[in-house]
Image: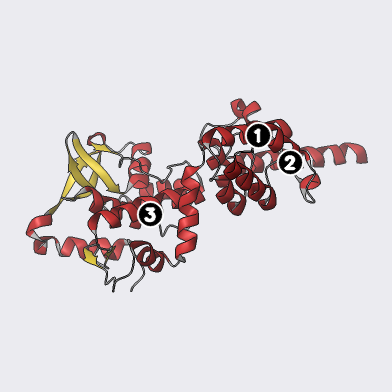
Amino acid sequence: MSKLDLGLPGYQSMFESTEKADSEQTETIQDIELDAISDFKDHPFHINLDEDMVKLIESIEVNGQLMPVLVRPSKNGYEMISGHRRKYAMEKLGYQKVKAIVKNLNDDEATILMVDSNIQREHIFMMEKAFAYKMRLEAMKHQGKAMMIDETCAQVEYKSKGKKSIEILAEMVGVNRNQIQRYIRLTHLIEPLQQMVDGVHPDGYKMAFNPAVEISFLTKEEQYDLLACIEELAATPSLVQAQHFKAASKEGTLSIDYIRGALSVEKPNQNERSYVKWSKYDKYFPKSYTNEQKDRVVEELLTSWARKRQKENVR
C-alpha cells in the first residue's frame, strides 16, 4: 500500500479527475468565502501560531494559495475537511475567499479524509494522534470496511482479508495494534493531564507516554486528586508509581493521601527537574506562545544578561 500523500500532485490529480467523479460523490472547485466555512466537528488537530504556521503564512503571502482546501456542504454553508491550517493562515493574511474542492461526503467518509490528511504531518502532538486514531477507528467500524485514500485523494476500499479494523488501521499508519490501543487510552485523561502529555500545560508540568497510559485507567475523581498532588508537590508520577495507582484504583483503595505519599518520594531524576509556573508570567508573552517558545525567550534574555554581567565584572 502506498503511503498517504496529500501534497500538490495529489490535489492536481483531483482537479483532473473532477469530471470523472462518481455520480454519488460529485465534486466541484469553487471560490468560497472563508466565513462560510466552519471547522470540522471535534477536530482533534490544534491550530497554533507556531514556527510551522509562520512558515505557512509566509509561503502563502509570497506564493498565494497553492493547494485548495477540501470541504463538504453543511446546513449553514460548508464544513472544513482538510485545510484548517491554510484557512487560518489566509485569515491572518486578510484573504476573504479560499479556493476549495467541494465534495459530498457522509460523516464517516469525512472523518477518514480529515484524519488521513493530517496524521502524516511531521509535528503532531500525542493527544492529537490519540483522538485521531479513535475517530478514524470508529468511522471504520461504522462503515464495516476499511477505507484509505489513494494518490488522487479518492476513497478506495482497503482489502481487509478478514482483519479487524484496528489491525488494518495499524498497518495503514505503521504502528502495531497494541500501540494504537494505548494511544486511544490517552483520550480518557482529564484535560490538564492531556496537556502534560503534550508538554503544553500552563505551568510546565510534563508526563511521559507510558505513565500516562496507566493513569488513564483511574477514575475522573482520582485523576483530579492526582492533579492536585502534582501541583502541590511539583512532581509527576513515574511508570512504577502510575502502575501502583492503577492497581490501587482497581482495588478501590486509591486515595489522595496515597497519591501524595507516593509522589513525595524523591525519584532518581527528580533533583534535576524543575517546573516554571508559566501562568505567572503569561502577561509578558503573546497568547499564542507555547511553553517551548517561552523557554527560548527566557534563555535568550538570561544569556544576554549573563554576558552583560560578565562585561561589567571585567571592568
Q: Residues within 10 Å of mark 3 (few under 14, many from 20)?
A: many
Q: CA distance from mark 2 to mark 3?
A: 39 Å
Q: Are marks 2 and 3 in contact (CB under 8 Å)?
A: no
- Furthest toward the front, the residue is 251
Is 210 situated above or below 158? above
Tag 3 residue: 118
Q: Residue sitting at 60 percent across and 25 percent down?
A: 283
Q: If the image is split into quadrants, where does the N terminus sit?
A: bottom left
Nearer to the camera, 133 or 27: 133
Q: Secondary structure at mark 2?
A: helix
Tag 1 residue: 255
Q: Quadrant of residue 32?
A: top left
Asked whether, in this view, residue 308 is left or right of residue 120, the answer is right
Q: Quadrant of residue 144?
A: bottom left
Q: Earlier in the sequence, mark 2 or mark 3?
A: 3
Q: Secondary structure at mark 1?
A: loop
The amino acid beneath tag 2 is Ala
Q: Are marks 3 and 1 in contact (CB under 8 Å)?
A: no
The amino acid beneath tag 3 is Asn
Q: Position of residue 67 (x, y in %)?
A: 29, 55
Report if residue 85 is visible in the image: yes
Tag 2 residue: 262
Q: Residue sitting at 29 percent across and 71 percent down?
A: 162
Q: Secondary structure at mark 3?
A: loop
Marks 2, 3: nearer the viewer: 2
Q: Residue sitting at 34 percent across and 45 percent down?
A: 84
- Res 172 label: none
The amino acid beneath tag 1 is Ser
Q: Position of residue 222 (x, y in %)?
A: 58, 35
Asked whether, in this view, residue 244 is left or right of residue 314, the answer is left
Q: Residue sitting at 18 percent across and 51 percent down?
A: 105
Asked whether, in this view, residue 259 is left or right of residue 87, the answer is right
